[in-house]
Image: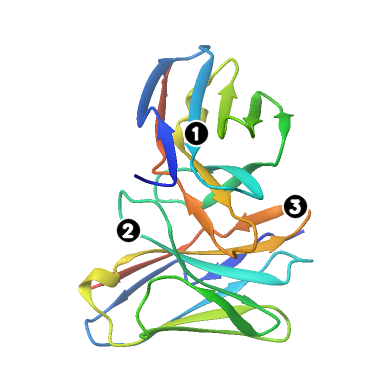
Amino acid sequence: DAGVTQSPTHLIKTRGQQVTLRCSPKSGHDTVSWYQQALGQGPQFIFQYYEEEERQRGNFPDRFSGHQFPNYSSELNVNALLLGDSALYLCASRSLVRGYTFGSGTRLTVV
Amino acid sequence: KNEVEQSPQNLTAQEGEFITINCSYSVGISALHWLQQHPGGGIVSLFMLSSGKKKHGRLIATINIQEKHSSLHITASHPRDSAVYICAVSRPGAQKLVFGQGTRLTINP
């Protein structure tokens, strides 16, 4: 049973560019959350998707947007990248019974 | 003050020692989660607790709802247990996890 799959694992982008990160949730999970973890910090909540809609959003600018597809997979898009967007981006899927399952993350470096 | 506080921030011990990591929270919760993160890696969910105690192998997690406190114990610690252990809470009606700052555990052989 595959867990949460994120792609790509590593990515280098130039300031001002746009990036799309992808997440496939664990089988049986229908809710996907995205977190940003800067080096040495705890994860910060970006947003959560359920039934293809954004249900809650953290304190992130509109440059961060997302999407959830009918198969529950999700994308995180970041526009106009800043150096400060360099971080590990974590995707977590959830079931009410078993709680959260995290992916291994995408490490984004903005240069 | 953070909603979720962990102690200690760093812990170094010898192989075989009994390890305890503490987590205190100041808000009402629907569940508390203990997570493990290896360097440069993703996060593994160890436990989800809403009451009492859970055990998995050498790991034991307890929670006291009245005192708003949880502990993660590792028995017979091993160098492969070296990682950052993170406490996080989910709040009733809210969709996000609120994370503690993590405890960096190093087990020396």
Name the amino acid, label 2. Ala
The secondary element bearing badge 2 is classed as loop
**What residue is rendered at 57% in x and 68% in y?**
A33
- The span from disc 3 to disc 2 (Cα, nearest Å) is 27 Å
Q: For this rendering, which residue is in front, B38 or B24?
A: B24
Question: Which residue bears the numbered disc 2?
Answer: A38
Q: Tag 2 or tag 3, which sits nearer the N-term?
A: 2
Q: Residues within 10 Å of mark 2 (few under 14, many from 20)?
A: some
Query: Residue A50: horizontal and vertical position, in percent?
Result: 67, 77
Q: Residue at x 67, y 70 (%)?
A: A31
Viewer-nearest of labels 3 and 1?
Answer: 1
Q: Amino acid at mark 1?
A: Cys
Confirm whether circles 3 and 2 share one chain: yes
Residue carrying label 1: B23
Label 3 to label 1: alpha-carbon separation = 21 Å
Label 3: element kind? loop
Same subunit: marks 3 and 1: no
Identify the residue shown where x is 64% and y is 31%.
Answer: B63
Which residue in the structure is indicated by mark 3?
A98
Which SS class for mark 1?
strand
Residue A83: assigned label: none
- The part of the image, by quadrant, that contains residue A61 is bottom left
Quarter containing the N terminus of chain B: top left
* Residue A111 visible from this viewpoint: no
How far from the left and from the top, in percent, is residue A85? Answer: 29, 71
Q: Position of residue A9 (x, y in %)?
A: 46, 66
Q: Is residue B88 above or below residue A96?
A: above
Callout 3–callout 2 Cβ contact below 8 Å: no
